[in-house]
Amino acid sequence: MVKLIMVRHGQSTANATNDYTGWNDVELTQKGINQAHEAAAQIQNMDIRCVHTSVLKRAIMTAYIIQDDLNINYAPIIKSWRLNERHYGALRGQNKDVTREEYGVEQVRLWRRSYYTMPPKLREPDPSVGPYKYLDPRVMPVSESLFQAYKRIVPYYLDTVVPKLLDGKNQLIVAHGSTIRALIKYLENISDTDIDGVEVANGIPLVYEMDSKLKVIKTNRK
C-alpha cells in the first residue's frame, strides 16, 4: 500500500484579505505558518519520499516548513508551474466581496466554483520572467477555468508523481485549492457538476491510500 498526501498551503495574505490570488506570489500569514506546522504534525509518520509543489512562494514555504518539521530536508522537492493555482485572469488581486457587488453573487460563484467557466481574461499573458523565464509564452494563460487548469495539473501527476507511487514511495503534494480540487476530481472520478461542491481547506492534509495499481482504497477526505 502506498500513500499520496496532498496539502493546500497555509493561509496567505490574500486569503486573509479575501482577494483573488491565482498566480500572484503572496506570503503566508502567521496563521498560515502555524497551519503548515499543524499539517506536518498530522503526517509525521508517513515516510514521505518526495515532495511536489508549485513555483508560488505560499506553497513553497508551506512545503519547506513541513520538510523541516518532519526532518526530511533530504527528500527531493520538485517545483513545477504546472502545480500552480489556476489563473484568475483579470480578477487577480481584486476583493471577492467587491466583485460580488459588481457582478452579482451567481456570476462570482460560477467564476470560482464552476468547472468550465473562465474568469475575465487579462489582455496579455504575464511576462516570461522568474520561474516562467524559459517557458514558451504561448503556454502562459490569461485566465483559466478549473477544466483548463486540470489539463496541465493531471498530466504532471501522471508523468511525475505516478511513477514514484508505483515504485512504492509515498508522495506529498503541497499546492493550492484548485490544484488539489483537480486532482481530487481525477482520483475520485468526480463529475464535472459535482466538483462544484468540493472544498479544500488550508493546511489540512488529505491522505489517499492506494493499492499496487493505484486504485484508491481509503481516504480521509470527508
Image: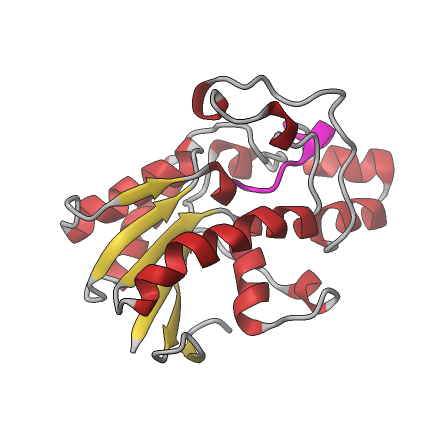
Looking at the magenta stretch, what is its main secondary structure?
loop
Q: Is residue 87 magenta?
A: yes
Q: Residue at x 73, y 25 (%)?
A: 122
- State the residue in front, 191 or 21: 191
- State the residue in front, 74 or 58: 74
Question: Taking 148 as reference, is 16 left or right?
Answer: left
Question: Taking 37 as reference, is 184 left or right?
Answer: right
Residue 68 horizontal/vertical position (percent): 18, 44
**Span colored in magenta:** 84-93
- State the residue in front, 12 or 1: 1
| Residue 203 is at least partly visible in this image | no
- State the residue in front, 30 or 204: 204
Q: Report how many numbered discs are placed on residues in the image.
A: 0
> Is 33 situated above or below 138?
below
For residue 164, what is the image quadrant?
bottom left
Q: Residue at x 60, y 72 (%)?
A: 189
Residue 2 horizontal/vertical position (percent): 30, 72
> Is 206 situated above or below 127?
below
Residue 187 horizontal/vertical position (percent): 52, 69
| Residue 39 is at least partly visible in this image | yes
Question: Taking 122 as reference, is 202 left or right?
Answer: left
Which quarter of the rendering shows the N terminus? bottom left
